[in-house]
Image: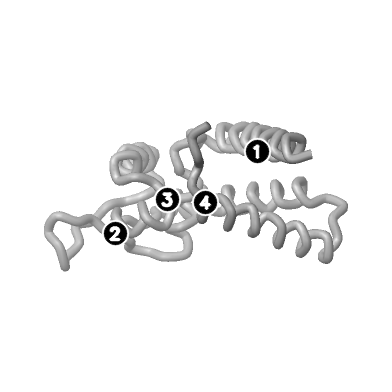
Amino acid sequence: MKQRLRQLLFEIEQLKRSKVQEFLLGIGLTPGQGQARILMSLESSEHVTQRKLADECMLDVTTMSRTLDRLEKQGLIERRRNPGCRRAYLISLTAAGRVKAGEVKAGFRQLEEILFDGFGQEEMDSLAGKLERIKYNLKGKMYEKQ
């Protein structure tokens, strides 16, 4: 049963990833680079440092820098020198970036509807608790060599 559950989690992740990739490509974003996460994060907090944004989006600084370059070339974000630190930039959405972030948010809401179609609140609460426990287990235990 454990192997079956692991396989189900893998298959769900692959199907979800496929849907997200299709959606992101359809709105002009590159899947797998954190562009959607960055846009969503910037929508809720303006003028964020690159370091803070990288932490919020769980991206390393190098990936963040390259991804911000792409988003800037697309006209979705702007970088301004941080008056409090000459070496740092403050990142914010442009008007086009706000529109794109809205598209991302709407697409993710649609994904949630697909994922949880037919689930009642009690079922979602139960599933959330079980998934939280799996997450806790993964964070707290070391992988042992066989």
In this figure, which residue is indicated by the disc labeled 3?
A: 58
Apparent side of residue 22 relative to residue 101 in the rendered image (left or right): right
- Of mark 3 and mark 1, the one earlier in the sequence is 1
Asked which quadrant contains residue 10, the reply is top right
Residue 120 visible, this angle: yes
Secondary structure of the residue carrying tag 3 is loop
In this figure, which residue is indicated by the disc labeled 1?
A: 13
- Of mark 2 and mark 1, the one earlier in the sequence is 1
Q: Foreground: 34 or 4?
A: 4
- Of mark 2 and mark 3, the one earlier in the sequence is 2
Q: Nearer the viewer, mark 2 or mark 1?
A: 1
- Do the residues bearing badges 1 and 4 touch, measured as CB atoms within 8 Å? no
In this figure, which residue is indicated by the disc labeled 4?
A: 141
In this figure, which residue is indicated by the disc labeled 2?
A: 49
Secondary structure of the residue carrying tag 2 is strand
- Of mark 1 and mark 4, the one earlier in the sequence is 1
Crowd tier of the residue under label 2, counting other residues whose Cα lies within 10 Å: few below 14, some 14–19, many 20 or above: some
Apparent side of residue 37 relative to residue 14 in the rendered image (left or right): left
Q: Measuring from the top left, give residue 127's x and y in whole percent.
A: 75, 57
- Do the residues bearing badges 2 and 1 touch, measured as CB atoms within 8 Å? no
Q: Residue at x 20, y 62 (%)?
A: 82
Q: Amino acid at mark 1?
A: Glu
Distance between the Cα atoms at labels 2 and 1? 31 Å
Secondary structure of the residue carrying tag 4 is loop
Q: Amino acid at mark 2?
A: Thr
Distance between the Cα atoms at labels 2 and 3? 14 Å
Q: Residue at x 45, y 43 (%)?
A: 35
